Amino acid sequence: MLIVSPSNLHYPITVTKLLAQPEDNVQRNDKLFTYEYAYQMLQQDENGDDYEVVKILDTDYQCEIKGKLTTWKIAVDDEIKGPGLALVEIEEPCRHEVQFAGMCTICGEDMTEISYNQSTPDTHRASVNMFHGNTALKVSEAEAFRTQDEAMRRLLSKEKLSLVVDLDQTIIHATVDPTVAEWQNDENSPNHEAVKDVRAFKLTDDGPGVRQECWYYIKLRPGLAEFFEEISKLFECHIYTMGTRAYALHIAQIVDPDRKIFGDRILSRDESGSLQAKKLKRLFPADTKMVVIMDDRADVWEWSANLIRLPAYDFFVGIGDINASFLPKKPDADTPSPKVEKIAETQASDVDEQEVKDTEAAASTNGEHVGGHEHTDSTQQAAGDVSTLEQLVSMGGGDNVEALKEKASKQDEAIAAQLADRPLLQQQKILDAEEEKANQAAADKDQNGEAPDENTSHEAYRYRHNLLKDDDEELIHLEVALRKVHATFYNEYKQQKAGHPGESHLSLLPDIKNIMPAMKERVLRDVNMVFSGIMPLNVDVQMSDRALWAKSFGASVSSDITKRTTHVIATPQRKTSKVRKALRHPNRIKVVTEAWLFNCFTIWRHLDEKPYLIDFGPDQQDVQNGTDTPFGQEQALLSSEDEDSGPTTDADDEGDGAPDVMTGRNPGLRIETGEREEEDEEDLSKYAPNEDEKSPMTPMSGDWKGIDDELREFMGSDYEDSDESDGPEDSEMDEAGETNEQMEQQRDNLENGVHRKSLPVLSGKRKRKRVNHSGRSTDGEDSDASTALSNDGPNLRRPKRKALDRTSSLTNSNLCTEAIRGGSARGDGSDTESLALERAFEQELQELSDQLTEEAGTPRTEPNKENSELLNVEQDEG
Amino acid sequence: MFFIHDLERTINLHPSFLGPNIANYLKDQLIADVEGTNTGNYYIICVIETTKEPSGRVIPGSGITEYIVPYKALVWKPFKGETLDGVVTSVVQNGCFVEVGPLTCFISRQSIPSDLKFDGNATPPQFTDNAGQIIERGTHIRVKLVGIRTEVGQMFAVATIKEDYLGPLDM
């Protein structure tokens, strides 16, 4: 080791004598040479006056290491001008490059001892921690490079690459909710099928916390065994998880009982070294040319180019990642998880007070409810976003013991909450309640036909109402992608090698960091996309999770529709102004659901947009809300900026009516808007409980698609139908003596031209609805009306055709546009209310559509015929 | 190396334990407290006997009774240069970890005879000379300690097998 002049001497110094000769063995603190230096000092004369003198002092230089002196770099009388100059070369017997728990592993010396003249502690010589499962063993950088070099050569010889695998929500989904065990044992449970292969293990935590033992339920991502079977031939797999070591070992035992796939290559948070981020450097300190990562979160990897990001595996709906408290908060709590969304919708639109309270309680205590992976934050935040600051704070929270403890206790709490609240059970209860309702409805319908058959109807709904669905296919696509990456890498490598025979082959290695992004960027290269109605309002679109993900696949993301825009990613629920703009260029811009985007990410191909196109109906102006789910939890949280006020507002005057969307009307997040709100709530409570909120548009298995199409048709027709029947129903309403203030007000609005179109429809609907109720309760009064109207479902087909033939609807809509312009100019108050009405209208539609779906499922002819006749009569009147 | 060591332990007893079984309570408490612990210098393997009936002292103000219990214990203190038998727990590229009872040792690759080569492609990874000698997870192995370091409650050692009669044992 070359000894250089240290920084703490009084330069310049002049060497006066060398005390050791080459080939001498020197010990630490032995004197190597003596030197002189000039020192300016103050002295006092006899009068007490200061004067400066320069003194030449001499001293000796002591050696800071032991070893054999090989060569002197200095000679007697040399002047050393400053620090950092070579003095002497000493060959050490041991360089202490690998240290274990503060000892050199070769000589066994204690490295933690520090002597007074050491420039750096010996422990700094080996500072790189690169081994799985152990933090005590450290190596020097040079040693790390050597080690990895060797490992890479070994991989090359086997034509393998490294694959770093995340556990939670990537290859497995874990929960501690004991409901799972109950479902497993109960063959009659609707979820039995899905959970029967869930594995369980008991984990005893010896931490200081109260939690002693806890059963963990592990669901493997479908196709996992086959995936690893194939992939382990091409990749050397490592586990890198934020779970504890014991947890990771248990999972490894389940995933890989023979220890063939992962062996000992398991890195858990106990050894990770960082509680916030995952770093490839931890395992591959030298270089990451041959490493591929699979994870469901990109932020923890800082969007590493080695990463293949999978959509999170969310089997136990609403549970999230049980080890998430050890990672920074999810930037968008909105990563693609159609199931969660589905549930969110379900819950949000289920306004049955008690249930909402239940879920809310579950959400707030559990903290990681619907889209949220935050554990202790409020529900509002759970569904929303996490500020950068917060993320920084949580990152800065640092790698100290307290932070660790805090997080561990946070996790303990979360787990305890999960155990106590049983979020799965709660959610299933909600679904069951729905089912109950649906059955009720079915039974009602059956009443004039055959006797209600509980069993068959139960069977029919069983599939529909199980909470857990086992329908994930990501791994199949991932395997294809990984194979491609592997093949590309080795093809390139072989080409390089053929071109440069004889050269050291490690320098010729292609880099995964170039190969994979290049492959990915081809996927959506010519796509310029705009997100609409998907991101929360206050999120920087460019930096959002989705946008970054899309960009990693080569797409460009704009915040507004431009000339280059090719795709608009939207939700079928809302037709925003951007969507409106986009729809004006049907040939250039495709309006697709998020599913398209995520499937492209999954399959690594620019998929045909056709199945994903959002059909906002034939008439852009009219069929706004008629399609889908009334209002989900999401809706209230999403950007309202580009949301139109009313169903028919033209995109140009969007600014007018924006504020009304702020009256987020979901149970979890409520924004006070004053008295109007109460009215709205009243409205809602009238309608909501009877609504079956299962969204027909949410992506489901193929069987449902047909129904969906049919349904969409019905919806349209229903709408037209309502439109047509405005007149008579209005008069009906008068007859019924609707005189309460609210109605008056609505009609005022109506007359003032706010939503001239939707309002009358709504009032009509209201009327009809009441009738429905009485029909169901079989009071007898109004019964003729009810039989006439309660089953107005499938027969609407005919009216629709009729309606389409007519031109009147078109003129109507034009009128309506005019009316809306007037209305939105008028002010916000009425808007708020009209929105409520609109929502109620949506719900009505929804309910109707659900009835339709049910009817589509169970063939019934008799009553329909009657109804259709009746309806026709009604139509004609209109 | 194992020793029989005379030790003392201070035990505080709640007044509810004062009664005819007090000697048993004390012994149970002693065993629960000290067996299997690491004092920093040695491990206390087991308590052999309590050497004399202790007499307690009531702590003024709290009612707690303090007993100073003298006992004989079997202790194990590893020494630098000592040869020990252990079991390999994990093999990495730079060496392998061996557990000798409660003590974790690391054997560096430089301390493994050079004919034993690391084979990372094997499952599990191993050091082997392709002639019957294999060091992998679970292998019984005889090592010689070259360094010991203690921290509070913890002990680590570095070992070597690069000497005669050291290395994997035929079981």
Image: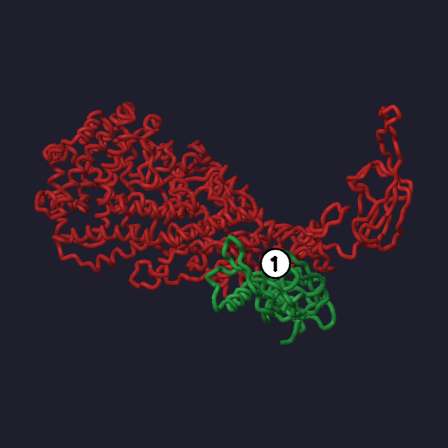
Chain colours: A red, B green
What chain letter is assigned to the residue under label 1? Answer: B
Direction from residue B35 to residue A196 in the image, left or right? left
Q: Is residue A229 visible?
A: no
Q: Is residue A793 above or below residue A214?
A: above
Q: Which amino acid does the dot numbered 1 rest on? A: Gly
Q: Quadrant of residue A150?
A: bottom right
The percent position of residue B28, horizontal first and vertical second, equals: 52, 67
Q: Residue at x 30, y 45 (%)?
A: A356
Residue placed most toward the observer, A251 or A454: A251
| Residue position for label 1 | B153
Residue placed most toward the observer, B61 or A83: B61
- Number of marks: 1
Residue placed most toward the observer, A9 or A856: A9
Q: Quadrant of residue A609?
A: top left
Q: Residues within 10 Å of mark 1 (few under 14, many from 20)?
A: few
> Which residue extends farthest bottom?
B171
The percent position of residue A422, horizontal first and vertical second, equals: 36, 53
Q: Secondary structure at mark 1?
A: loop
Direction from residue B117 to residue A453 in the image, left or right? left
